[in-house]
Image (cartoon, rainbow, N blue to C red):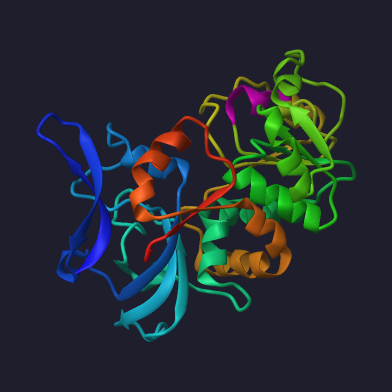
Amino acid sequence: MFKALLVEKNDDGKTSASVQEISTDQLPQGDVTVAVEYSTVNYKDGLCIGPGGGLVRTYPHVPGIDFAGTVEASDDDRYKPGDKVVLTGWRVGENRWGGYAEKARVKADMLVPLPEGLTTRQAMAVGTAGFTAMLAVMALEDHGIKDGPVLVTGAAGGVGSVATAILANLGHQVAGVTGRPETADYLTALGATQIVAREEINETTKRPLETETWGGCVDAVGGDMLARVLGQMQYGASVAAVGLAGGANLPATVVPFLLRGVNLLGIDSVMQPFDNRQRAWGRIATDLPMDKLESMVVPATLSDLPKLGADILKGQVQGRVVVDVTA
C-alpha cells in the first residue's frame, strides 16, 4: 500500500480530494513503475483538484502533471531499477494518473533519464513550467534573439520565473512583467534588470505598431497582452507564446508580422519528441543557476495540495511549489 491524493466524484456531481492508501494493482497499465519522490503544483493541477473537476474525465483520479523519481520495475530495456527519471507532459495528471502518489506506472516513451547534475528535487523545482520555459528560450535562440531587453510576461509565475532566470544566466537583459508590485525584489533576485507593471503593457495604445522595444519575448499570458506585445517587438524578433491565462483569443492584426517580420512561436510541452525533451533537460542542467532555482521553491506535501490547488487558481502562488510525495 502507498499514499496518493485521490480526487473522487461525489453523488452531487462535485469532486473532493483527499490523501488515501491505495495498492499497486490499482495503478494503470504501463511499462515502467516509478517510486515517485517529487512532483509540482501547476495551474492544470489546480483545475483537476478543484470542485469542478476541471480537466478530469474519469474518477477516481490522481492529479500531478509531472514527477521525478526512481525506477522500481521495468519491462523496457531502456530503464532499469535504480535509474533516476523525470516525466512531463503526455496528459499525465489529466487523462492518466499522475505524480501525486508514491508510485506511478507509465509507458517508457513518456520518461526521460534525469540528466547528470540534477537531483529529483531540483528537476521538480524546474517541473513542467521550467521545462516549458526552456523550450521557449530554445525556440527564441533558434530564431535569433535581437539586441536589447527580452520581455517575459507573467514573470512571477512558474514559467516566467524560470524563463527570467535562464535568460539572465545566458547574459540577456530581462524585463519582467508583473501585476504585483511586491514581486519586484523576487524578480530582481532572479536576474531581471527591469520591472514592467502589467498596466504599462495593457494601457498602451491599440495601434498595431508601436516603438520597437523588445529583442524577444517569452509570453506566459496570451490574450490582450500578447496582442499588445506583438506591436512592440523589434524588427525580426520572436515571441514564444506558452500560456492562455489571458485567454485564447488574439485581438491582433497581421501588421506586426507583415511590416516587422515578427515571429510568433507556439510552445507545446505536452508531446515533445524524445530528442527535444532530452535536449531541453540537458540545457536545464547546464544553463539554469541552481542557487536561483532554490530561491523559487515553496515546499509542500500531499496533504497541502487541496488548498494549494485553490490558491494557484486565484493567482496567489509565487515561484515553484515542490511537493515531497514521500513526506
Which of the pair 132/169 is nearer the observer? Answer: 169
Question: Taking 314 as reference, is 97 left or right?
Answer: left
Question: Taking 307 as reference, is 318 left or right?
Answer: right
Which of the pair 27/121 is nearer the observer? Answer: 121
272 in the magenta segment: no
- Whether residue 288 is visible, yes or no, is no
Span colored in magenta: 222-228
Residue depicted at 73% across the width and 31% down the height: 257
- Whether residue 12 is visible, yes or no, is yes
Instruction: Quadrant for residue 71, please give it.
Output: bottom left
Residue 65 coordinates in the image, percent (x, y): 41, 53
In the displayed orientation, state which residue is furthest to the left: 11
Residue 50 coordinates in the image, percent (x, y): 32, 36
Which of the pair 250/91 is nearer the observer? Answer: 91
34 over 208 or under it: above or below: below
Residue depicted at 9% across the width and 33% down the height: 11
324 over 35 or under it: above or below: above
- Give the prevailing secondary structure in the magenta stretch: helix
